[in-house]
Image (cartoon, rainbow, N blue to C red):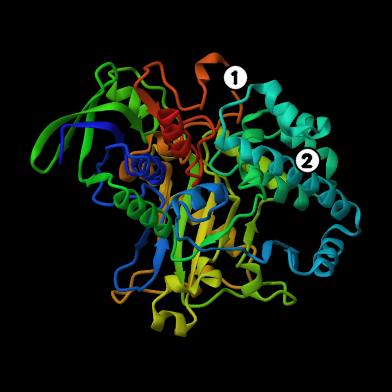
Amino acid sequence: MKASRYDVVVAGGGHNGLVAAAYLARAGRRVLVLERFGHLGGLAVSAQAFPGVDARVSRYSYLVSLLPAKVVRDLGLALELRTRRFASYTPVGETGLLVDNGDAGRTESSFAAVTGGTKDLDAWKRFYAMTAGVAARVAPTLLEPLRDRAGLRAVVADEEAWRDLFERPIGAVVGERFGDDTVRGVVLTDALIGTFADPDADLLANRCFLYHVVGDGTGDWNVPVGGMGAVSGGLAAIARAGGAEIHTGAEVVSIDPGTGEVTFRDSAGEHTVTGGHVLANLPPAVLSRLLGETPERPEGAQLKVNMVLSRLPRLKDGSVDPREAFSGTFHINESRDQLAAAYAQAAAGRVPDLPPAEVYCHSLTDPSILGTDLRASGAQTMTLFGLHMPARLFDRDGAKEDALRRTIASIDSVLAEPIESCLLRTPAGELCLEAKTPVDLEREAGLPGGHIFHRDLTWPFAESAEDGTWGVETAHERLLLCGAGARRGGGVSGIPGHNAAMAVLG
């Protein structure tokens, strides 16, 4: 290290910490970033997950929606995001619901085949026109000082939208607006990603839904070229170019919020540095522990499965090319009734009989993550995100294997052939498949309860004076949150990193 005193010490080198460091270093502040792992990026990383297989998998987070274009422009981040023409495909018996952003007529035909008419398609258009209006108005406020509830309501300027998205359970709203069970489920999945909630009763599902449809003003979920590691790698390079010092293999072991002293441990021993401000790119539960407090324990609720396929599986629906179906979000047993049944079973402490899940193939949009030979062979990556898999289900031996077995069976139930027949094998003969439960995320990534958002998502407005000006403030003046657990945190966004930097600079 070049010094023992810094203007800002950032505890944690995930993408949000790197955004904060980049802004502050470029503003002339002396910045030190401490990251306990040997790599940067937190969960926004790419890795060769399977030995001898030349595929860079986005191992944890995998798509970009919330990252504001303003942050990309401000920092000069060289990042290519590709849109997906096909929003989603949902198998239904021998057919399926295809949402084709490039062909409205094909989408209309698909809705007619699945729902038997145009009523749900018309409702779909009205509903997503409403969410698009909310997204366009709310997204810019995420990089501004927090408004209170009344202030954000004035920004939304649509009483119907405010009522249906902010005040009434999203499950009830979807139930009223749509008649078809499959369509209802497709809409509701955005309210349940990484969130264990009953959408008919819990407004936590509404908060999750908002984060998934607001995005950067469009709600589009885009593919980062080069994988998620391209996001974190680019941010680290910008921070370093601005003069930030970044140390990996440096685990923060204590923070004194009064003096700004941060003690960390690396291969050379224990060290203490002082920051005028300390920015915690850490889950709030971890920060509480470092402060000597008793943390609240969050609970993650997902099963992540990474795969490399030798080829795409065949579909029961011969009218849809698998390359179309899997390049968007491919919904698996996620009708409204199936989601409700799975939630009830998980809430009772059981792995769902038919786990709802969704998959997509990054390599269909961005072949660069595959090596030349692998690409030529027709191989593809496949990422699965399983819903209603709370951490509480994995506190017994064999639970992970049970959840994975049932999830594979769930996939197979909607395909024309078993997914295992399409899995690539490593040179050693192992299947290219890895599963991550909330317990795995806690052990491997240090996320308490395996919660991918660090804790339950919050409303994008201030609910009390304790939320501060930017939503990153803590009870200690020199200590700020800059990670996903900040208000307006969650997802790969850089928003809390930006807001923490603005709180320091302001």
What's the amino acid at mark 1?
A: Glu
Residue 350's x, y, as percent?
53, 39
Q: Are marks 1 and 2 in contact (CB under 8 Å)?
A: no
Residue 21's x, y, as percent?
35, 41
Q: State the image quarter where residue 454 is shown.
A: top left
For disc 2, the marked residue is: 174
Q: State the image quarter where residue 98 is shown.
A: bottom right
| Location of the N terminus (image quadrant) | top left
Residue 168 visible to an observer of this rendering: no
Residue at 72%, 31% (x, y): give it: 155
Residue 498 vs 242, above or below: the answer is above
The disc placed on residue 336 is: none
Residue 229's x, y, as percent?
39, 58
Q: State the image quarter where residue 388 is shown.
A: top right
Per the model, the C-alpha gap separating discs 1 and 2 is 26 Å
For disc 1, the marked residue is: 463
Residue 317 visible to an observer of this rendering: yes
What's the amino acid at mark 2?
A: Val
Residue at 39%, 66% (x, y): give it: 56
Residue 419 vs 338, above or below: the answer is below
Q: Is residue 439 left or right of residue 387?
A: left
Q: Residues within 10 Å of mark 1 (few under 14, many from 20)?
A: some
Q: Secondary structure at mark 2?
A: helix
Q: Viewer-nearest of labels 1 and 2?
A: 1
Residue at 39%, 26% (x, y): give it: 480
Q: Is residue 290 left or right of residue 224?
A: left
Residue 457 vs 318, above or below: the answer is above
The front one of 240 and 423 is 240
